[in-house]
Every structure is written in structure tokens, then in C-alpha cells.
Image (cartoon, helix red, strand yellow):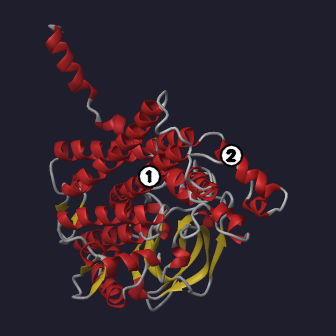
Amino acid sequence: MAESYRLAMENPELGSAVGFSGYRMSRFLHICESADDLVMQSQMQRELGRRTGTCFQRCVGQDASNAMWSTTYDIDQKHGTKYHARFVEFMKMAQSKNLVLGGAMTDVKGTSVFVVFQMTDPDMFVRVAERKPDGGVVLRGCKAHQTGNLNSHWMIIMPGGKMEKADKDYAIACAVPVDAPGLTYIYGRQSCDLRAMEPGDIDQGNAKFGGQETLTCFEDVYVPPEYVFMDGEVDFTQTLVERFTAYHRRSYVCKAGLGDVMLGAAATVAEYNGVAKASHIKDVAKDKLVEIAYLNENIAGTAMASSYGGQATPSGNFLPDVMMANICPLTKWRNVLFVQQLGKHNVTKLPYEIARLAQDLAGGIIVTLPADKEFRNEVAAPLLEKYLKGKQGVTVENRRRILRLIENMTMGRNAVGYLSESLHGAGSPQAQRVLIQRLFDLEMKKRLAKNLAGIVE
């Protein structure tokens, strides 16, 4: 989280922006006013991935803010509500103080086959349990897999899916300070997490940066009316979810930044293991590095294409082209949406192959390397220093450090941010495959083939 502020100081053009409020603040708080803003967001996210080697916790709030901006405007236009003015004031406050905003969309759901209002336990989706005379609401329920909220000042609550008329109490969007009475955070476990409590930093792999997720429970959390941005407008729940996922799927360009780190780690471990220059295998190692680079740029390319294609909404902010269904012809939207789904679908697969290639170059020692404490043991240390040497001139400690970094990113704490998050974040892969199937226009492609084959039906 702190690195996002550091980037803004070191490279203000990339890491900061002057918002509609007139304040210069972190670019994560910026409401996109052009396609160039979307591009700069993507470049910033890749850079932070390079700097941290993990999830840097701010993309959900950024994407929620931009999705809420246009959705509140559209709700007001249809229903005569005052949500957009409220949201503008909230964002002015956040920009003026340069705050960190989190976002919360995914509900625990229970058994997801049920219709929301038919759930045995009504709290499986966050809901309005009570509406106060002053226009405020009281929330109950639970949001799952929440990334970064513990590090934030405020979180933006959004409905977790399309709601029907009977689900009115679940169609709620609002802002809540993270220390509001009634909130309980339950911290999630991560692989190898206790290594952070051990002496030394080598076995952590990445001792500087890591992420966290929580189960966020709402037990009668009061939200004043000025922070309520949707309350019962079920006809806009799908709109909000689609716009948020459009931004958030584009935000997985951050994994290209992590992939840059993986490429560097894979090249370094190949060198330290002595395979980079071994005559009989150096071409194989080099080819694997080329493959990592190729896969990684595929991730970056689709995100950048979505950003460059951004268009203005009636509210004045810009959306990636993927969500232009309401303001451009369906045929155009269909094409860019198809590209966007392919982009996120790439992210559900390609980091895993990059991780496999990095582990391949690392060798079996990545899972058999003794603990750091053994290198301080008077009996074991001399033996380890003797037998774990790699390339001449490279210390055993440096070899251990690069191995632990690869372990950290592919099976340790930061594999959460690089692999599991890539698979399930912004929607699991099956949802994208269903949409891809809807959009690839198979009948048109059959006509192309039949025409060239001379088939007349």
C-alpha cells in the first residue's frame, strides 16, 4: 500500500493525477476523464506489480469508484434520485485527503443455486436490515475474499450480482469507514505465512511486500444517508456489476508486472544454477525465458487494448470499451467485449504456465532447500555452504534468495496475488467462457467457411 504513495512521489506523472476536485492525489482515486487516463492506470498498475511482486491492494477501490460514478448518474437520470451528487461529494472528500479506498462486492452466498430472497439465512448476501427515518440504512451480512480493506480508510460496498424485484433489500451500494462500529474482519491464512514470524528474511522470499484477505462481517452497521449511493434500484445492479468487472478485468494488467519479476527471477536462477551458459542446455533455457516473455506480454496487450479503446459515458467519465453496450452499437460492443473476455481468460491460465517454467528453471531444489536456520547451525552450515554452491562467483545466500522468491510467488504467500487471484479475481473462468461462447458468432464463421468451400444450402 505504501508503495503506491511512494510511486506518486517518485513519478508523479504516472502515480498521481489532478482530480475533478482540483487536488493532486494518487491516481488510484482518479475518475477517468479520457482513454489516456485508462492507459495511465494500466501503466501504473504494471509498474507497481514490478515494484512489489504481489497484489498492492488498491485496484478494487479504484475500479469501484469509477463504476459507481457512471452508475449513480444513470440511476438519477431514470429514477430522479440524488445518488450522484452524494458520490461526487464523497469522492471530493477522498481526493482532498488522498485516502485509500477499498471495495467489497463478493458475498459469501452460501449455496449459490438459490435465488437470493429464497436463502434460508438472509445474511448470506449483504442486505439492508433496517431503513432509518433519516434516510440512513443498517447493514447485515458478510463479504468474502476482501483484498486490502484492512489497509484502507473507507470501503465501497456494492451488490454481488444481478438482483430481482424481490431482492430489493440486497440492492445496496454505499461507503463505510473501515473502523465503523459493527464491522468484524477475520484474517485469512496463506501458504507459508508463519515464515514472516521467524528470524531472518530469506525464507520469506519477499520480505518487503505481501497481501492479505479477510472475511468482512457486517453486524448492524449504520450508514448515514450521505454515503448511500443505491438503495433498492434492482434494475441497476447488473449495470454496476458489469461496469465494475470491466474496469477490474482490465486491472489484471498488474499480473504483467508480477510476470516481469518472474521473468527476471527465472533468468537469474538459470544463471545461478549454471544452466544459462551450459552449451548443451543454454538454448533450452533461453527458449523458456522467451516463452515467459511471450506469455506475459499477452496479458499486458489485451489490457492495454481495452484501455486505449475507452469511451465517454453520459456522466463524463471513461469506461474501457468492453462496457459500451449502452452507448454504442451492439456489433462494436460485441467485438471489444470478446477481446476483453479473452484478456481476462488469459490471466486465468498464463501466470500458471509462467510459474511452471520458472520452477522448471529453478530445479527440484526449490522444494528441498533447507530452512534458513540450518545455515546457522554449526554442524549443518559448513556442509550446506559446500554442497549448495552453484555458478562460480555466486554466493549460496544469493542462490537461496532467488529460489525463495520463486517459491514465494508460485507456492508461497504471494502465490495468492499472482496465481489464485488471477484465476478467481474479477470473476472465475467459467463465467468468461459462457460469455465468450455467446459472443464469438459461430454462424457468421460457418458462413465464411461454406462460402470458400462452395457450399450452397
Q: Which residue is mark 1?
A: 264
Position of residue 386 in the picture relative to residue 301 (left or right)? right
- Percent across and percent down for residue 292 are 41, 42
Q: Secondary structure at mark 2?
A: helix
Is 400 in front, or is 329? 400
Give the Cα separation between the discs numbered 1 and 2: 20 Å
Q: Residue at (40%, 75%) from the top-left corner?
A: 4
- Percent across and percent down for residue 339 are 28, 43
The amino acid on which the numbered mark 1 sits, given as a three-letter code, is: Gly
Is 78 in front, or is 251? 251
Q: Residue at (58%, 58%) from the top-left corner?
A: 398
Is 197 in front, or is 220? 197
Q: Residue at (72%, 49%) from the top-left corner?
A: 386
Position of residue 398 in the picture relative to residue 67 (left or right)? right
Q: Which residue is mark 2?
A: 367
Residue 235 showing in the rendered view = no
67 is higher (above) or lower (below) than 283:
below
Q: Residue furthest right?
A: 379
The amino acid on which the numbered mark 2 sits, given as a three-letter code, is: Val
Q: Secondary structure at mark 1?
A: helix
Mark 1 touches mark 2? (CB < 8 Å): no
Residue 135 showing in the rendered view = yes
Residue density around tag 2, few if under 14, some if 14–19, many if 20 or more, within 10 Å: few
Quarter where residue 100 is shown: bottom left
